[in-house]
Amino acid sequence: MAVFLPLLRLLRGSILFEVRGGYPERMINLCVKNGIPLWDGKRLEGAFQARTTAAGAKRLPELARKSGLLLTIRQRQGLPRWLERSKKRIGLLAGAAVAGAVLILSSSIIWNIQVTGNHRLSTEEILSVLQELGVHRGTFREGVDVRNVERQMMLHLDDLSWVAVNLKGSTASIRVRERVLPPEILDVTTPSNIVSTSTGYITAMDVFEGQAVVDVGDAVTEGELLVSGIMEDGNGKNRTVRSRAKITARVEDTLAVTIPLTQTDFLCRGVETRRSLILWGHAFSLSGSQPPEGLWKREAAVEPVPFAGSFLPVYILRENYILLEERQTTYSPLEAMELALEELSRQEEEKLASQEIIRREVTGQELEDRFLLFADYLVEREIGEEKEILLKNVE
């Protein structure tokens, strides 16, 4: 009851009054005797001040005269006072009524959709399926058959093992659980050979299944057979197996980098932010609708407006225009070579990360408009690649 008392007083209205002279205690007793509520009472210098209801205040002048006190009304608060002051403001009252109706209507509409539990499936993919099933921003909550939506989502999204749709206020919470994928089963039945992917010479060879046709130290060429999946049994008949082996060889490789001596890039010269209010699906610009002049890159984000732990059908569209300035930079051959070496290092990390570099020879060549950098490598890497055997060829 203590929680609702302030709200009740706000609706019924309250009066702050003050009495002076005589004995305030006499008036307090008369108020109690006549059932007039008093609260927030306090003594002031030569006076007594308290609050009462709007209805109780109507009898205060009479009780003040009986007590020989001078009554002064200091403040009027609450809904009755607001209505009294707003009698001539019909538009304000109508607007408040419309706003209340909009809020009540909005609470029955889905304005926010939250998706949790997805990892392989993207949120956009799940929202797209929900859109097809009639669940999107602006959907009336009462028109959503939750159980049917759950069943249809399971039919549309094969990766789901479980889904729950919960509607609370203007928010639709979609919780999903994805299927646990079975481990990949190694195919040991399809016959295959192992061939070389590069030209080089073999440094190590471990054959787990199949018949090796080369040995450590042999030179091989790209596409050459290394391990055969066709084996001869004790009776002199051929049988096929799926070859498995780990074969390492030293091979030659080359990387090339080209750096133009004159390059065009773009500098950021500032950022302009534009905001728009999206209400009921319509955008209203708050800071100009025209994009800035010149070169720019746009980044945009839409954010819902929170209200009392829920969301209103109101969104803020924030657009950041990154202003760009075109710039041409001319590099000297020495500067271009340094850039080329940096790019070469990046390519090595990307393309040769799993390989052991035995030798590297780097050469550069300066042309009229660019600088070329070549790197020749001797690397050690696995070269075996599995190729399926076509049985008709075996016959």
Image: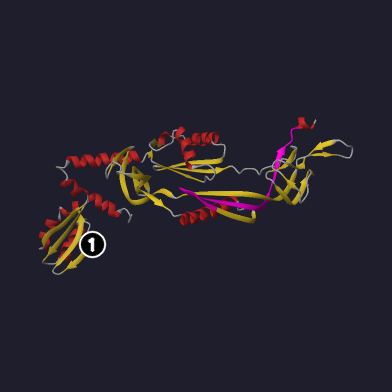
Q: Residue at x 77, y 47 (%)?
A: 208
The quadrant of the rendering that contains the N terminus is bottom left
Tell me where residue 186 sits by quadrant.
top right
Above-or-below relation of 47 to 205:
below
Query: At which x and y percent is residue 271?
Result: 33, 50
Q: Residue at x 37, y 51 (%)?
A: 267
Q: Residue at x 12, y 62 (%)?
A: 67
As drawn, is 203 to the left or to the right of 305? Answer: right
Query: At which x and y percent is residue 352?
Result: 60, 52
As drawn, is 65 to the left or to the right of 225? Answer: left
Question: Is 387 included in the stretch rendered in magenta?
Answer: yes
- Visible residue check, residue 317: no
Query: At which x and y percent is residue 258?
Result: 51, 48
Question: Is 377 included in the stretch rendered in magenta?
Answer: yes
- Visible residue check, residue 120: yes
As drawn, is 216 to the left or to the right of 325? Answer: right
Q: How many marks?
A: 1
As drawn, is 331 to the left or to the right of 206? Answer: left
Neighbour class for label 1 at 10 Å: few (<14), some, many (≥20)?
few
Q: Read off the magenta span.
A: 364-390
Q: Tag 1's secondary structure?
A: strand
Q: Residue at x 19, y 48 (%)?
A: 82
Say which residue label 1 marks: 40
Which one is in front, 198 or 41?
198
Which one is in front, 316 or 30?
316
The quadrant of the rendering that contains the C terminus is top right
Which one is in front, 147 or 209?
209
Chief SS of the magenta region: strand
